[in-house]
Image (cartoon, helix red, strand yellow):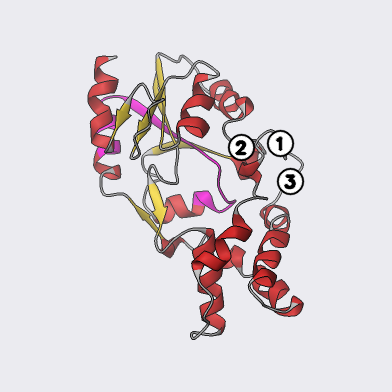
Amino acid sequence: MKYLIWDFDGTLAYRQGGMWSATLLEILHQEDPACPISLDQLRPFLQTGFPWHHPDCPHPEIQSAGQWWNALDDIFEKAFLGVGLDAVQAKSMAKKVRLVYPNPTAWRLFEDVLPTLEQLSAQGWTHLILSNHVPELRQIIRCLALDQYIARVFNSADTGYEKPHRQAFLTVLASLKEIEQIWMIGDNPEVDLAGAESVGIPGILVRKAHAQARYYGETLQQIIPIIDLI
């Protein structure tokens, strides 16, 4: 069989309005629409501490969505404290991140996603997703009507292995049979491409060009001739 492994964030979809800093700012504005705090004030507190910031430290012991989010509460509390909230407010608002960030209504597919997946499916490719993401990824995928094209989802919040850890990719390979062709497609040259290539999976970079990428498509449609020729 022919398999395409897709990254999710930045490759197939994006969170409208922004990612983690924007989520915290949204929560602040829910409490106080006139809140003067800015994204630039929040960003420095969210640069470290997430599981994907230390992919060399697997977390298979985390077995539930609640445990996964509980492990991040301290990051959000420190961010809210850092911009001037008191301890009680910071703790309360940190718990709201798990409700706001994965809300499916905040997520959008890039315009070229569904036409490309449909065309490639017609050509006999089976689509998989391998993502460093929140536990609610499958719900987001369903709400975006993406699940009709995706055979399987491999999410770091479930497996405990963040890309580019080799085991993240080996887990995918171990689940597949009769691999005739396989590619990894993503927007990060190190996390997606280098990680895949470390286990023998060739990669195609999309959306953002990089000198290290051997194969690149500015749009998803541009990867089709690459796959067809090689």
Residue at 28 percent across and 36 percent down: it is: 220
Find residue 218 and report its horizontal and vertical position in percent: 27, 37
Circle 3 is placed at which residue position?
Answer: 62
Q: Quadrant of residue 74?
A: bottom right
* Cα distance in 3D space between marks 1 and 2: 7 Å
Residue 72: which quarter of the image? bottom right
What residue is rendered at 40% in x and 53% in y? 14
User: Which image quarter is the N terminus in?
Assistant: top left
What amino acid type is highlighted by mark number 1? Pro
Vertical arrangement, residue 14 with respect to residue 55, above or below: below
* Residues at marks 1 and 3, CA–CA distance in whole angstroms: 10 Å
Q: Which mark is residue 11?
A: none
The residue indicated by pointer 1 is 58
Query: In the image, is residue 159 above or below residue 100?
Result: above
Locate residue 95, reporting x and y percent: 67, 68
Local SS, label 3 = loop
Nearer mark to the viewer, of 1 and 3: 1
Quarter holding the C terminus is top left
> Is 127 within the magenta?
yes
Is residue 52 placed above or below 29 in the rendered structure? above
Contact, mark 1 vs mark 3 (Cβ under 8 Å): no
- Residue 90 part of the magenta segment: no
* Whole-number angstrom distance, CA of label 2 to CA of label 3: 13 Å
Q: Percent position (x, y) of residue 61?
A: 77, 41
Residue contact at pointers 1 and 2, CB within 8 angstroms: yes
Q: Amino acid at mark 3?
A: Ile
Please rate how many residues cluster around mark 2, counting C-alpha atoms within 10 Å: few if below 14, some from 14 to 19, many from 20: many
Determine the image quadrant of residue 93: bottom right
Circle number at residue 162: 2
Q: Mark 1 or mark 2, which has the lower sequence index?
A: 1
| First to last magenta residue range | 116-138
Q: Secondary structure at mark 1?
A: loop
